Amino acid sequence: QVQLVESGGGLVQAGGSLRLSCAASGSIFSINVMGWFRQAPGKQRELVAAITSAGNTNYADSVKGRFTISRDSAKGPVYLQMNSLKREDTAVYLCAAVPVGRAKYDYWGQGTQVTVSS
C-alpha cells in the first residue's frame, strides 16, 4: 500500500506562483509513475503532469511552459511548480501513483485546493 499526502495549495492572484508537494509513504519502491491531476467543479478530472521513476515527464497542453513536475530523488517527494497561474487553473489538485506492473493510477491523495483570483 502507498499513502499520498499533498500540500502547498492556497489562494493566489492571477500571474502568481505556487508549489505543490506530494509525499509518499508505505511501499514507495513499488511506484513507477507519479502524477498530478486536477478537478474543477463541473469538469472532468484531468492529468496535469506526470513523472516516471526514470525522470521522464509529460504535461497537459494547457500547462506546458507554466508548470514543472519534479522530484529530488527517484522515490522522494514529487513537486508541481506552477507559474503564471490563471483563473482556469483553479481546482482541487490530486497526487496519484501508478504501481510497478500496473497501467493505471491506483493510489490517490486527498487533494489540495488551488484557487486563482483575478
Image: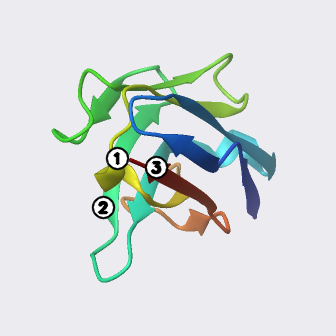
Q: Is residue 101 visible?
A: no
Q: Distance between the residues labelled 3 and 1?
A: 16 Å
Callout 1 secondary element: strand
Callout 2 secondary element: strand
The reply to whether the C-beta atoms of the residues labelled 1 and 2 are less than 8 Å apart is yes
Q: Which of marks 3 and 1 is in front?
A: 3
Tell me the crowding category of disc 2: few under 14, some 14 to 19, or many 20 or more residues within 10 angstroms, Cα based: some
State which tag comes first along the sequence, 2 or 3.
2
Residue 96 shows which numbered tag? none
Q: Which amino acid does label 3 sit on?
A: Val
Q: Which amino acid does label 1 sit on?
A: Val
State which tag comes first along the sequence, 3 or 1.
1
Q: Which residue is drawn at 71% across and 40% down?
A: 29
Q: Position of residue 106 (x, y in %)?
A: 53, 67
Tell me the crowding category of disc 3: few under 14, some 14 to 19, or many 20 or more residues within 10 angstroms, Cα based: many
Residue 116 shows which numbered tag? 3
Q: Distance between the residues labelled 1 and 2?
A: 6 Å
Q: In which quarter of the image is the N terminus?
A: bottom right
Q: Which residue is drawn at 65% across and 48% down?
A: 9
Callout 3 secondary element: strand
Q: Position of residue 37 (x, y in %)?
A: 43, 56
Residue nearest the observer in this picture, 53 or 60: 60
Instruction: Please give the residue where the numbered disc 1 appears in the rendered image.
Output: 48
